[in-house]
Amino acid sequence: MQKEQNNGRFSDLGIGEEFLAVLKRKGFKTPTPIQQQVIKPALQGKDVVGIAQTGTGKTLAFGIPMIQRLAIYNGQGLVVVPTRELALQVEEELRKVGSSFGLRSAVIIGGASKFPQIKALKRNPHIIIATPGRLVDLMNQGVCKLNRIQIVTLDEADRMLDIGFLPEIKRILQTIPKDRQMMLFSATMPKAISTLASAFMKLPLRIEIAPQGTPVKNIRQELFVIRKNDKMRLLDSLLDEYKNETVLIFSRTKHGAKKIARDIRNMGHTATEIHSNRSQAQRKAALDGFKQGRFKIMVATDIAARGIDVKDISLVVNFDLPDNSEDYVHRIGRTGRAGKSGKAVSFVTPSQKADVKKIERLIHKSLPVLDLPSLPPERERVYNKESFETKQKRYGKQGGQSGNYARSGSRTSRSRQKQSSGGQHRKSNGYNKRRSSR
């Protein structure tokens, strides 16, 4: 593990004078701990494995050495990330410090048209920022060649493995030149990551800023034990307390996120949602609106746990606990960023005691249980007229039937299917709910 110390100045890390001037002009005064320990060896061409929490400045830790070394060696850099949102965020951060040097970048992500991405690749970008699935897709089509890659970074590597991208990552690393520099960043270090590092890295320097699973210190963590049917009433009470603050709410499923966002809007709050059922344009509009303050509340699935960099999120609410304990750390890491304080509240049902224990073992801390406040009465549901008309178009005129009768018939048919399949159907449905959060 790297233990070299410095006095906390970018000028001590081997960064060129022109680059230092850019950093100063952009307002970057003091390197974060991960930047202090990664930048110097990375500028020397060493392979690096960095273990650090979210929100610690990892993008510049690998971005500064990548940009500076590419300016010298005239090759290409590749950054591979798990989600579209994180890809766009990384590109934005790199552009802040690289635009002064004429940096050209290409963002290669799913959920968006391939043609602008292919056009960007033809402009011979200095750095490609990509999600694994779309990158391999374009590689298979022969429109993305990685033969000029000299530096590759895998960011949030554990998350990429969690969502099943190991085959794509191996394909990418087997395709790029063997004589390249590689940096790997992860919040946790499971065995699969260690195996990946051993197979594709040359004597990597391991830099661990905090023990894996350690949340940011300045986040106050609390939980409520509550029945599932009372969660929305508790959320109503909590949002009333934080009505002038920026709030991020996590749901375990995309269908749950949509319903929660709808109910919050019915409470009179400005709310948006981000999940895998939304198009890339919708997700970008939601994130931009949340960043700019048009929406005070965002409801998200775990696709946002590592892909959102929004300043001044006051409160993170785990409306549902995550499937994986590690995702708890990434969720609450959306608040308390850049040295500021934050709060994270989790809603836990009485049957989830074991899940809480797993989280407490991971973070090496007991979570205080709060007394429930006086809950407001359940609000009357308000249904959106447009969505009702959309359902009419979807279910109307089936088999010569129309309107309410057709919708009623479709529900009856689904009900019969459930009855005939019995418990097996219910088990399968529960599995699909867990998968849908991806």
Image: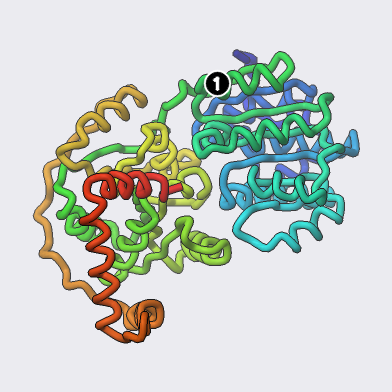
- Residue drawn at (31%, 69%) of the image: 265
Question: Which x, y percent locates residue 418?
Answer: 25, 56
Q: In the image, 221: left or right of 48?
A: left
- Give the residue displayed 90% in from the left and 34% down from the top: 73
Say which residue label 1 marks. 208
Q: Residue 187 location in percent, x, y?
A: 51, 30
Q: Secondary structure at mark 1?
A: strand
Q: Is residue 316 left or right of residue 176?
A: left
Q: Is residue 70 left or right of residue 6?
A: right
Q: Position of residue 13 (x, y in %)?
A: 73, 26
The quarter of the image holding the N terminus is top right
Quarter of the image for residue 12 reads top right
* Residue 250 visible here: no
Q: Residue at x 71, y 22 (%)?
A: 200
Q: Is residue 218 above or below residue 246?
A: above
Applied colour scheme: rainbow
> Residue 71: in sight, yes or no?
yes
Asked which quadrant contains residue 21, the reply is: top right
Q: Looking at the image, which is closer to me, 423 or 278? A: 423
In the image: residue 248, left or right of residue 377: right
Mark 1 is on which residue type?
A: Glu
Q: Which quarter of the figure has residue 69? A: top right
Question: Badge 1: few (under 14), some or many (20 or more) residues near its Cα, within 10 Å?
Answer: many
Task: Kindly identify the residue that appears in the image at 55 percent across and 23 percent down.
Answer: 192
Residue 282 in the image: state x and y as whole percent: 52, 66
